[in-house]
Image (cartoon, rainbow, N blue to C red):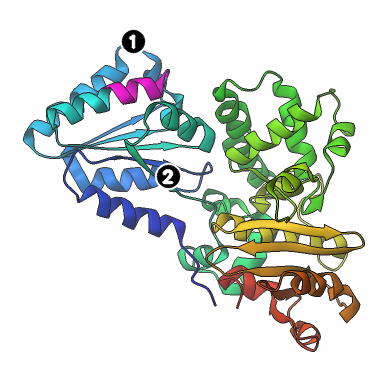
Amino acid sequence: MVEIENAYGFCRKELVERLSEAAPGRMQILTGPRQVGKTTLLLELVARFGEQAVYAAGDDPNAVLPGYWERVWADAESRAQRGTALLLLDEVHRFPEWAAKLKGNWDRVRRKHTPIHVVATGSSALGVTTGSHESLAGRFEKLTLNHWPAASLASVFHRSPREAVRGLVQFGSYPGAIEFEKDLPRWRSYLRDAIIEPAIGRDVLALGAVRRPALLRQIFAVAVGLPAQIVALQKIQGQLQDSGALETVAHYLALLADAYLIAPLEKYAAQTLRRRSSPPKLITLNNGLLTAMHPDGAPDQQREPERFGHWVENACLAFAVNQGQRVSYWREEPLEADAVFEGSWGNWAVEVKTGRFTGQELHGLLEFCRRHPAFRPLAVTAPGNEEAARRHDVDAISWEDYLLSGPP
């Protein structure tokens, strides 16, 4: 099996190592979804550095007061007179004109050789890295703390592997929501109030690139309602209460991707232009969002096998995206492969089957691999159905094992 990265442990290890280097080095910018542990990680660093650490949050009400930014930096520079200081800027994109101010302060620190490390976090990839690329080029290193995999849930919350993967499919993997899973109304309120509303109502809107917030919310709702499905932009457009140009729909899907909510997968093709012109396959990056938004909650495997299959396929493809693989899909009517993986896991063409299937249903998978021999075929099946795929010379793994440890 491939090595599954525990994003929280990896980011903590990387940050501790980088902060042990001589200061000032490069700023560390940590991005990732809401409620996956970015603030917890910063508070761990506060405890590690003790009195030499200064913590400031962009969503703190005091952050909008005149002179707050300047006082925070003055405090860090004062502590740096006694040794290496650490300045932690949580939700940095919430500070007004953060990129320009951060650039000015950092350049002054570098000129004076003041021993300060800076770690900044943001819940929107675009909100942090666009500003940083425009104003901070060459001054920062980026880390991503992504959605938790099932293996992390099993380890941290002492769940059995089967409980962890089943829980991930039904309730997602937001660690803060685990304690509410037995109280569905409370769990749903937590996801909507602590994750969905701040991500859409604050993180994305703070970018200044959304002229029609109501349309953005509708596109999110439509995308979450079509997990692991290939949907033409015209079809999305037709389901909206408000009209919007196709370019606007595509732009808002890209913003939802930058907020770690939705991944609109492109069709696999040798030419990038053909990828971009194809309809996207919509993947919700955490199954908790599916359950929170669906009126009936998570599907029952026995009563709703088709919806359960979409939930499992969504979880499998989101897992690959969150683990840093390049994920696309392939379709040449009437043939199709659910996903194409490229990256550290190797090159795989993947078909997800949660029910019984025949060799004919693997024809698209095998045809893709015939045309693209660099890829190996993989069937992700219901537990116990692996042999049905292996009889056709297709590697197979149950979706439960796959969600724990990736492809073989």
* Vertical relation: 315 (above or below) 77: below
Which residue occupies the extreme front position in the image?
271
The reply to whether residue 103 is visible in this rendering is yes
Question: Residue 52 or 159: which is nearer the viewer?
Answer: 52
Q: Which residue is at a point 86% across and 74% down the rendered structure image?
A: 363
Query: Image quadrant for the N terminus?
Result: bottom right
Q: Secondary structure at mark 1?
A: loop
Kindly identify which residue carries mark 1: 66
Residue 156 image offset from top left, x and y in percent: 46, 63
Q: Secondary structure at mark 2?
A: helix
For the magenta stretch, what is the residue range? 96-104
**103 magenta-colored:** yes
* Vertical relation: 187 (above or below) 355: above
Kindly identify which residue carries mark 2: 38
Question: Three-letter amino acid code at disc 2?
Answer: Lys
Question: Residue 279 or 21: which is nearer the viewer?
Answer: 279
